[in-house]
Image (cartoon, rainbow, N blue to C red):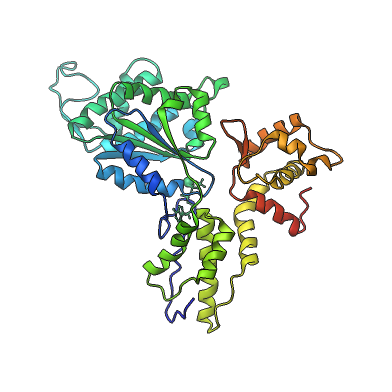
Amino acid sequence: MANAGKKVRNPFRPGAGHMPPYLAGREHETDEFRQLLEQDAILANLILTGLRGLGKTVLLETFKPMAIQAGWLWAGADLSESTSVSEENMATRLLTDLAVVTSSIMTAMSYPQPAGFTGQPPKPVTLDYYSLKDLYDITPGLVSDKLKNVLESVWLHVEATGKRGIIFAYDEAQNLADHAPKDQYPLSLLLDVFQSLQRKGVRFMLALTGLPTLFPKLVEARTFAERMFHVVFLNPLSEGETTAAIRKPIHKESSPASFSAESVKTIWSMTRGYPYFVQYVCREMFDVWVQAIDAGHRPPGIPIKEIIRKLDSDFFAGRWARATDRQRELLGIVARLPNCHSEFTVLEVVEAKENQALKKSFSGSHINQMLVSLSDAGLIYKNRHGKYSFAVPLLGDFIRRQEDYGEHVR
Ligand SMILES: Nc1ncnc2c1ncn2[C@@H]1O[C@H](COP(=O)(O)OP(=O)(O)OP(=O)(O)O)[C@@H](O)[C@H]1O
Ligand SMILES: [Mg+2]
């Protein structure tokens, strides 16, 4: 890193949903979304999925201007757990988001009463939240009937404005759930309503992002979800893309500092292309170097151990704290499987020599049970083929490091 001489701004942005200074890769995923935008009848909706920190939120954010450019309206929000508490909450969410993009559209007649009903001449109204809600309230039937009626009526007006359609973009959609004991099915409601509208030719498209549990959850709620969505799975960046993510922000800022080829290699091997880690490590290293330069020192080597230790406490420790001692012991065995970075089976854990060597080894049914509670804690997930993976990137490395730090996981 060359001498700075002036106050240098750190361009790197580790943080949930923070747009990176340079969005590396993702061309293929962007092309896939572009194709979805070209649909005349909506046959496929988007699911953008991947582990924590892979860049789902920021990629969805870059899709927004693309969609608008292609003539779509864009409605959406984060799906909090409260949205998914009841069908009414889901309906309120959809109407609220819809109203934001339709409130400037004037209709020729008044909602909700048809012309002549009150003896008054119809007056133009805008499709703001209150008129959508009025129409919703006077529509008879179940929540789904009401929603379909409002959305279908809105579509006629949207189509008349020459817009291609509306994208309903929801982040953190893994929070969606049905609640059979309470007789509330907000997730199924969402799927039913969109499927029914799309069959009628209404161009309202869902773009959902979420953790890898999302798609299996949708399919479990409604088997037709399997055909309704095109699933885009985000992988870590390649070495070339990681290099661009490290180098380009510095060039863009015309920063007098730059990472050497060797440093770039080190960051690649520390982060293995996981975007959040790339931003995190680059930000830390940049700060260390700028401080050294400001103090008139030669830039030190990369403090790898220190940065990793900090990352462990900032990123991993909170998640690790959710596991009990016995769960940690099990995860310790998983972390030693050679395939722990991809997917593993219960049988592999049963047969692992570390398990066999335990005084109180884990049986298959015990492991199955514990993996369910570890899924609930957000540490692992079961994919559609019945295999398991870590839900947190590079968790296996973290677990193995715990032993180095002298914190016993087994
Ligand atoms: N393609 C990319 N190139 C460089 N940095 C990226 C890229 N994608 C994401 N990042 C960075 O990675 C971090 C995580 O991004 P983001 O919050 O979008 O991930 P996420 O998948 O939505 O995570 P979560 O599951 O926690 O919501 C951010 O700091 C972001 O700036
Ligand atoms: Mg996100």
Q: Is residue 252 left or right of residue 210?
A: left
Residue 100 shows in the view = no
Q: Residue at image x 45%, y 74%?
A: 257
Residue 73, quarter of the rendered image: top left
Q: Height in image: 189 above or below 161?
A: above
Q: Residue at image x 41%, y 27%?
A: 228
Q: Residue at image x 50%, y 80%?
A: 294
> Where is residue 53 shown, x and y percent of the image?
52, 50
Which sits in the foreground, 257 or 72? 257
Q: Residue at image x 32%, y 27%?
A: 133
> Where is residue 341 shown, x and y percent of the image?
62, 46
Q: Is residue 385 left or right of residue 136?
A: right
Residue 391, quarter of the rendered image: top right
Which sits in the foreground, 76 or 222? 222
> Where is residue 99 shown, x and y percent of the image?
30, 35
Which sits in the foreground, 302 or 8? 302
